[in-house]
Amino acid sequence: QVQLVESGGGLVQAGGSLRLSCAASGSIFSINSMAWYRQAPGKQRELVAVITSGGSTNYADSVKGRFTISRDNAKNTMYLQMNSLKPEDTAVYYCNAGVVTPYLGNYWGQGTQVTVSS
């Protein structure tokens, strides 16, 4: 059993910053790629950023230069530093991870709300 728990969401004014965390726990042998997704009301879930086990990263064009994804493999935790937030960043943010238990499974967190006011 693997759990992913997000934290750090909240309400912030445009131009502000937030830092999201995603902590994985349970019977974990190793974690492959981890990613942040978001889903705004009435829209499909979209990929925000992804980080491999080796630390390579990739970002959606809409957040490049503003968001930074990172991870602490020793703590099985992933982060998303969000700067220069815009109202269009408002969404529920979900973490996702490929976890080896030792069987590879795809896991999701429950989501954390980020609201950016104008």
Image (cartoon, helix red, strand yellow):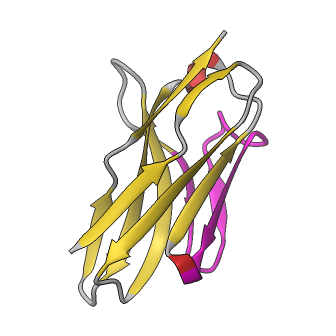
User: Which residue does the image show at 37% across and 43% down from the upper left?
Assistant: 111
Viewer-nearest residue: 102 or 75:
75
Among the 4 quarters of the image, the one containing residue 79? bottom right
Relative image position of residue 93 (x, y in whole percent): 45, 40
Range of the magenta residues? 48-74
User: Which residue does the image show at 49% across and 50% down from the upper left?
Assistant: 36
Relative image position of residue 34 (x, y in whole percent): 48, 65
State left or right for residue 48 relative to residue 38: right
State left or right for residue 8 relative to residue 97: right
* Farthest left residue in view: 1
Residue 55 forms part of the magenta stretch = yes
User: Which residue does the image show at 74% across and 28% down from the upper left?
Assistant: 16
Rendered position, 83 above or below 70: above
Rendered position, 14 above or below 81: above
* Farthest top residue in view: 118
Which image quarter is the C terminus in? top right
Relative image position of residue 70 (x, y in whole percent): 65, 63
Relative image position of residue 106 (x, y in whole percent): 29, 66
User: Which residue does the image show at 45% across and 77% down from the upper left?
Assistant: 32
Which image quarter is the N terminus in? bottom left
Viewer-nearest residue: 76 or 47:
76
